[in-house]
Image (cartoon, rainbow, N blue to C red):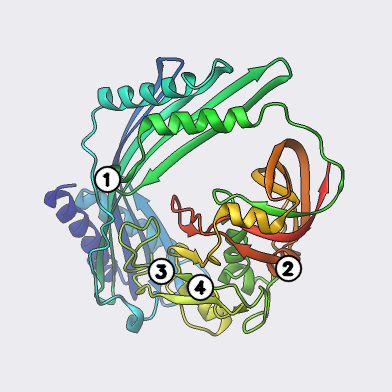
Amino acid sequence: MTSSDSSALQQAAQLALEEAKQQGATAAEAAASHSTGLSVTVRQGDVETLEYNNDTSLGLTVYMGNSKASASTADLSPQAVKDAVTAACGIAKHTQADPHAGLADAALMAQDFPDLSTYHPWDVTAEQAIEIAMACEQAGFDVDERISNSEGASVSSHQGERVYANSHGFIGESRGTRHSLSCALISQDDKGMQRDYWYDLARDAQDLVSAESIGRRAAENTLARLNAKPITTGNYPVVFAADIAPSLFNQLTSAIRGGALYRQSSFLLDHLGKQIFPDTIHIHEQPHLSKGLGSANFDSEGVATQSRDIIQDGVLQGYVLDSYSARKLGMASTGNAGGVHNLTVDHHGLSFEQLLQQMGTGILVTETMGMGINIVTGDYSQGAAGFWVENGEIQYPIDEFTIASNLREMFMGIQAIADNIELRGNTRTGAVWIDKMTIAA
């Protein structure tokens, strides 16, 4: 990303605001962005896909009093920007007024912009990316002759910049990079076939583990699933592995998001200040972590992000609100337009192995599938695969079973969280042990 790119984005955003004002808008906001990237996938030693992207866009929203309209353009030339503003203003004049519409409050705009180390371009060529992906896949094949096939190994590198400006006079710039390596393999023996994968993701390519270790881990995961046995239907303790445990807490944020609350479509409606987890659970946002995948100085409306507790001593401390949902609820924005920022679930000082030992006998879930989660009622039902655990030790793989409960019971049933924190996403947690769930074969 060059300084000229940044300047062009700022000029386009500011032109949109000026033009909106000239065309009678009482307020406006604009976000201009530019991103580039490279993605490579190889399969069985051959290049399967090679993709480049180079995308530029501007999105804007204008307000005529409490009437609003939006438009966008991929062309940042002055005339194209003006045309987009004209289109938005034309729509806004015919849009029904909404008393809750408008920019986020001026007093909430970010004032400080520390370097969060989110921008680390990777100068990798297509040829180098292909070489890395092939080494990754081959390392998986080399582990065991039972690795019979591959769904591919991939390398991707993306970088981008976004400038957000509004008629409060706020203008903020954010830059970010994301680089990843992944491999998915298939193993086979006389009893059948299994598939599994592994990956790594980071802001800085220097922080990625080696391609060979990704391939080997994918192979080991795949081999471990061979010779799966059935499980007897019943109620069992369950441990969600660290790499899938974030999905549990993503259901929490979905249920306390402003849109679900003002629509009264959440099982956590009116739960502010109430106990929804055991008193040992602490969940908080850390938006200013260096190199964090969810780090940001401001949200998509320019509101300053801040570290804050969401769950303290098991009690719900706050919702996840943008400015519109906050006004609908008679509250203030929490700086979450666009989502949460590095949602962090504190662990209980146990290693993963110690967590299994304390559970004793139960199920380790390593994969879930399906769409059987109802945020309105909290009902939870997912297809799953994993391992049977006995006397604190993994015994054998199990698959093709269903886990079911209600999120209220699952949250309150959390016994402990391990210290093997998952860092490859916006939700940071270790493995989660839940006292019991219904398991159906």
| Res. 386 in view | no
Quarter occupied by residue 103: bottom left
Q: Badges 2 and 1: C-beta atoms under 8 Å apart? A: no
Rendering coords of residue 217 (x, y %): 49, 33
Depth check, front residue: 255 or 278:
278
The residue drawn where x is 67% and y is 66% is 415
Q: Residues within 10 Å of mark 2 (few under 14, many from 20)?
A: some
Q: Badges 1 and 4: C-beta atoms under 8 Å apart? A: no
Q: Nearer the viewer, mark 4 or mark 2?
A: 2
Residue 286 disc label: 3
Secondary structure under tag 3 reads: loop
Q: Looking at the picture, which amino acid does disc 2 mark?
A: Arg
Q: Provide the residue designation for mark 1.
A: 75
Q: Residues within 10 Å of mark 4 (few under 14, many from 20)?
A: many
- Establish if 127 lies above or below 60: above
Q: Earlier in the sequence, mark 3 or mark 4?
A: 3
Secondary structure under tag 1 reads: loop
